[in-house]
């Protein structure tokens, strides 16, 4: 069963299609053949601007978690042999502070359906019963519906495909490295040197920054552009908000 044909989903995709086509027509005099790609970038900026309040909430949540870290560590030491009591006391601490361990997750959760919509728009030949003209749009000679992995598997990969995706992936990886350096989690120096758990977690958190680049190889070019712009926006926004809401 094609979920894109399900009426509510088809209506959402059709509305998103109309928005992108409208933006493409608006940007055509300025961006020329890259107007559709530019419309994806503009759409990303609009979405991220709408999510600025959620980003502020996330920065506040990070500040709160930083402030509570010593108390949480104390609870772990006190109740390390009683997991149930530790869980109760931890949740009580969050409740007393009027926060949650999941506070600030909205920006990440809100991105998922938008990426899914962009992915679907450049995956289907028809949207809500009409031809999908977005599939004919290109960026530097590469169709916006092309994925690097898909082109490699099908044997249709070209020099232009490799060059365009290399630029997008390099941008994502560069932002990931800048994010890793700027927001590297602190390592607990008091941990047992024979069990470098803190260092391991720090390395894992840093590696996770690069998963977006891996995902970008498997999605259509339009979705990869969305990911590149959104991670760049996220880095800039976090740097700005960290100055306003510094960690303890």
Image (cartoon, helix red, strand yellow):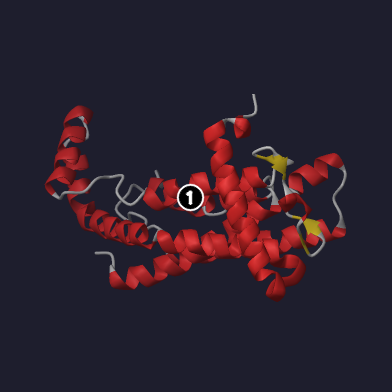
213 left or right, relative to 184: right
| Towards the viewer: 130 or 16 | 130
Quadrant occupied by the C terminus: bottom left
Report which quarter residue 14 is drawn in.
top right
| Towards the viewer: 122 or 225 | 122
Quadrant occupied by the N terminus: top right
Image point (15%, 50%), residue name:
97
Disc tally is 1
Residue sitting farthest toward the top: 1
Q: Mark 1 points at which residue?
A: 111
Image point (34%, 47%), residue name:
192
Residue 188 screen position, x and y as percent? 33, 54
* Residue 99 shows up from this direction: yes
Residue 117 screen position, x and y as percent? 57, 45
Report which quarter residue 171 is drawn in.
bottom right
| Element type at mark 1 | helix
Residue 221 screen position, x and y as percent? 70, 54
Q: Is residue 187 above or below residue 100?
A: below
Residue sitting farthest toward the left: 96
* Residue 124 shows up from this direction: no
Q: In this view, does 184 lie above or below 32?
A: above
């Amino acid at each position: 069963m094609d979920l894109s044909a399900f009426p509510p989903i088809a209506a959402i995709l059709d509305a998103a299609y109309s928005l992108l086509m409208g933006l493409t027509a608006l940007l055509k005099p300025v961006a020329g053949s890259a107007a559709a790609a530019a419309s994806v970038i503009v759409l990303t900026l609009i979405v991220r601007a709408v999510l600025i309040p959620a980003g502020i909430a996330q920065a506040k949540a990070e500040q709160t978690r930083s402030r509570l870290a010593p108390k949480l560590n104390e609870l772990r030491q006190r109740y390390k042999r009683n997991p149930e009591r530790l869980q109760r006391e931890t949740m009580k601490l969050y409740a007393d502070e009027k926060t949650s361990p999941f506070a600030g997750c909205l920006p990440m959760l809100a991105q998922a359906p938008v990426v899914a919509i962009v992915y679907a728009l450049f995956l289907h030949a028809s949207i809500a019963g009409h031809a999908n003209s977005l599939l004919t749009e290109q960026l530097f000679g590469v169709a916006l519906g092309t994925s690097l992995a898909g082109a490699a598997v099908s044997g249709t990969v070209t020099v232009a495909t490799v060059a365009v995706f290399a630029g997008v992936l390099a941008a994502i990886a560069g932002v990931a490295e800048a994010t890793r350096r700027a927001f590297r989690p602190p390592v607990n120096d008091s941990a047992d040197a024979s069990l470098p758990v803190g260092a391991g977690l720090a390395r894992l958190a840093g590696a996770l920054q690069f998963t977006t680049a891996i995902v970008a190889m498997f999605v259509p070019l339009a979705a990869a552009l969305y990911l590149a712009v959104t991670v760049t926006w996220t880095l800039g926004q976090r740097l700005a908000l960290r100055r306003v809401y510094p960690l303890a």
